[in-house]
Amino acid sequence: MDEQAKKTALRKIPYGLYVVGVTSGSEVNAFTASWLSQCSFQPPLLMMAVKAGTSSHTMIRESKVFAVNLLGKDQKKLAEHFTRPVSRIGNKFGEVAFRTEVTGAPVLEEAIGNLECEVRHFLEGGDHSIVVAEVIAASVREDAELLDLEETGWHYGG
Ligand SMILES: Cc1cc2nc3c(=O)[nH]c(=O)nc-3n(C[C@H](O)[C@H](O)[C@H](O)COP(=O)(O)O)c2cc1C
């Protein structure tokens, strides 16, 4: 395979950028994710790739819930903050306000909306696991445009 072509072609796939809230027992955490898409209307399912070996991966596997927080175009800093591993920097929330609703996973107050999900399938294999989850609650705070991965100048893919 032409490695450069593979990388260039894979990086053409468009993604949004989200902060995914996770929980397990009394713990909460959140991480930035881009590999996420709807994959069924009925039931409403999402698929997301979760990096193996991260704290968030362990927490989703244990609790089988998460909350997708939708970010607006002006929230790149928030996305950047949650790319840092909790194992290195400790509690990431600091001044980032959140609440818990249906699943117990953190819903960020400043997100433009959120989707709370229950895991239906957890497929381990590569360096990311594929999580297929049903949307069981949703809210929209502001009908604003979503932050795209491309406009951040970052890459996650290839
Ligand atoms: C632009 C970008 C996109 C990312 N997308 C994902 C993703 O889709 N899935 C994932 O598991 N990690 C993704 N990450 C990596 C996580 O944000 C990172 O591993 C984070 O530290 C995990 O948090 P934790 O260690 O507190 O669980 C992405 C990172 C960046 C910079």
Image (spheres, rainbow, N blue to C red):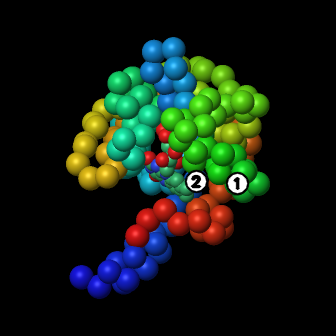
| The disc label shown at residue 17, or none | 2
**Residue at 69 percent of width and 42 percent of height:** 112
Quarter occupied by residue 57? top left
Amino acid at circle 2: Leu
Is 148 above or below relative to 110? below
Q: Nearer the viewer, residue 47 or 158?
A: 158
Q: Which residue is mark 1?
A: 76
SS for tag 2?
A: loop
**Considering the image in quadrants, where does the C terminus appear?**
bottom left
Mark 2 near mark 1, Cβ–Cβ under 8 Å? Answer: yes
- Image location of residue 72, percent across then percent down: 70, 51
**Residue at 74 percent of width and 42 percent of height:** 142
Amino acid at circle 1: Lys
**Dot 1, how many residues are within 10 Å of its Cα: few (below 14), some (14-19), or many (20+)?**
some
SS for tag 1?
A: helix
Mark positioned earlier in the residue sequence (2 or 1) = 2
**Residue at 65 percent of width and 56 percent of height:** 147
Asked whether the viewer can see residue 45, the reply is no
**Residue at 46 percent of width and 72 percent of height:** 11
